[in-house]
Image: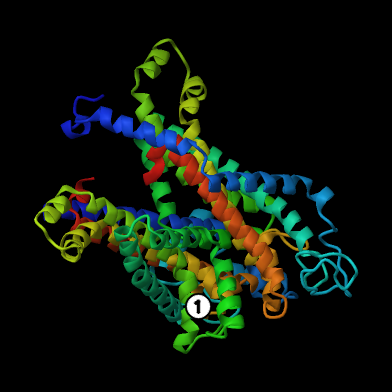
Amino acid sequence: MRGFVPFVGYRLFRALIALWLVSTVVFVVMRLSGDPVPLLLPPDAPTSEMERVRRELGLDRPLPVQYAVFLGNLLRGDFGRSIHFREPAGRVVMGYLPATLELAVAAFGLAVIVALPVGLLSAMRRNTLVDQAAMGLALIGQSAPTFFLGILFILLLSLKAGLFPTSGRGEWSNLVLPALTLGAFAMASIARLTRSAVLEVLRADYIRTARAKGLGEALIVAKHTLKNAAIPIVTITGLQFGTLLGGAVVTETVFSWPGIGRLAVQSIYNRDYPVVQCAVFLSAVAFIVINFFIDLLYGALDPRIRTG
Amino acid sequence: MAPSTPASALAEPDASVGRATTRRRRRLRVPALTALGLAFVVMLGLVAVLAPWIAPQDPTRQSLRGRLSAPSLEGADGKSHIFGTDHLGRDVLSRVMWGSRVSLTVGFAAVLVGGIIGSVLGILAGFRGGWTDSIVMTVADAQLAFPFILLAIGIIAVLGPSFPTLVVVIGLSGWVAYARVLRSQVLSLRSREFVDAIRALGGSFPRIVLQHVLPNVLSSLVVIATLELARAIVLEATLSFLGLGIQPPTPSWGGMVQEGREYLDSAWWISTIPGIVLMATSIIVSRAGDWLRDVLDPTLRGE
């Protein structure tokens, strides 16, 4: 495992830099939004009251000091109080987190379960009708706007065919359409990548050797191909899980799914900035942490990466 | 070639070059689907430019009597609406035509903004190296390690949705692709003899960039810009769908899909038609980008 510790250290350093940059952007955006005090108080509040709240929030102090306090609060998990819910913003966002996780895991699971066999089949039967149909669909899945896919699924599978409810959460049937919508992009990407990774391996000399030895096609795929095609597939698959979090904003809005993406959008309409900031920041943390572990997994799977 | 190049890479240069050129020649015959795609893009551009003259009706003209009429040659108000009318009786076809202006202007402007920022930073990072390079690439990595739509939503929520805000935010979301490619191209050009020669002759930095670097990277830029255009159009539509894009009553495809959502059961065409046009645009423009990449610059495949 020589070289693994510096590798982890470097990745950790990069993850921390990314977190710091995101929190700085959050701070700058918050300052750009202007004075939050009038939002916190009734419109007829006297000037002295406004001054008092401003002092209480530390807004009368110089910007560098405010920035330091802001970073300190983030480290302690203090995002301020939600204006709409009248609760700490962190607690509000945490309450919506399980729904988003449920949706993301379902979407990801669905994507992997469908995409791996389809990609493998496409590679084995390349240039047949099956392959072309699958890859055509994958191309559409990769470039179709998520929100419109959701609308199409609602129209065709829910309103016309009556197979699934249009919105809400609770039953498994509620989960199918949002998971399909959110997972579509990942599904398409993983299927395309699996196909090309398997094709790449099938061209290798050791596969020719295996064929020459007279091994059956099933054994060649099971024993030699899948193992070697795994590394690129695992990486892209992991990265796709991260991008799901961004897509969740749109999917949750389309299906009225009570997760943090929809909470963030609604909080924007409510001008509830502490909640928006907390949701954005926590998603960034989740995203960066997931990417960090994928990097590690990748490094563990393929020693060549560590030096690169 | 550098002396450290591994022998395997030099093993059969002729064979690989030969294969590359035959592939290139084959691909240069524009496939039928791509030709159709290019025709679609040209048509879309014409529609966007000519919308005020060719749209059958004023896209904001409401008609109580003609509300929610299905696609037909003769609607309830006696006019033809081949894509139907929406909940306010506005002609969907005219709105889709006008909507293409929003999609294309925001898309192209955002690509321009992202392209300029990304190119300048990429060229600087490549030429200067050292700290400049580290900072630019760290910021780029950090941005890639983050679902940008969340940030876009936050920024637009605070600054308010307007054309310039949208263009800058969408443009900023895409600068990394240009910066990475230009940086690597500059790095490889920097060590070439002709650049050294220009330097020795006293050529200034801007002169080297404008006259010698840009022409060399132009084809890569075109490829990235095309792929980015598709992404920018979808991002604009997504933000409009969330109510954070161009505001009503100006028609935009994303906004139209949003407005039609309530009527999906009774009047499917309000949402579906602009959505299909958007989806087709996105698929066709990104396919055109893929095709350009294969023809002009296959090395970008991995990016």
Colouring convention used in this rendered image of the protein: rainbow
User: Seen in the image, is B141 located left or right of residue B73?
Assistant: left
Residue A176 point in image, percent of width and height: 47, 80
Residue A80 point in image, percent of width and height: 51, 73
Q: Quadrant of the C terminus of chain A?
A: top left
Residue occupying image coordinates x 12% and y 51%:
A209
- Looking at the image, how many numbered discs can be counted on the residues? 1
Residue occupying image coordinates x 38% and y 58%:
A128
Q: Quadrant of residue B49?
A: top right
Can the viewer see residue A304? Answer: yes
Residue B75 point in image, percent of width and height: 85, 70
Residue occupying image coordinates x 68% and y 65%:
B273
Q: Amino acid at mark 1?
A: Leu
Q: Nearer the viewer, residue A218 or B217?
A: A218
User: Seen in the image, is A20 located left or right of residue B281?
Assistant: left
Badge 1 is on which residue? A177
Residue B21 to residue B267: above or below: above
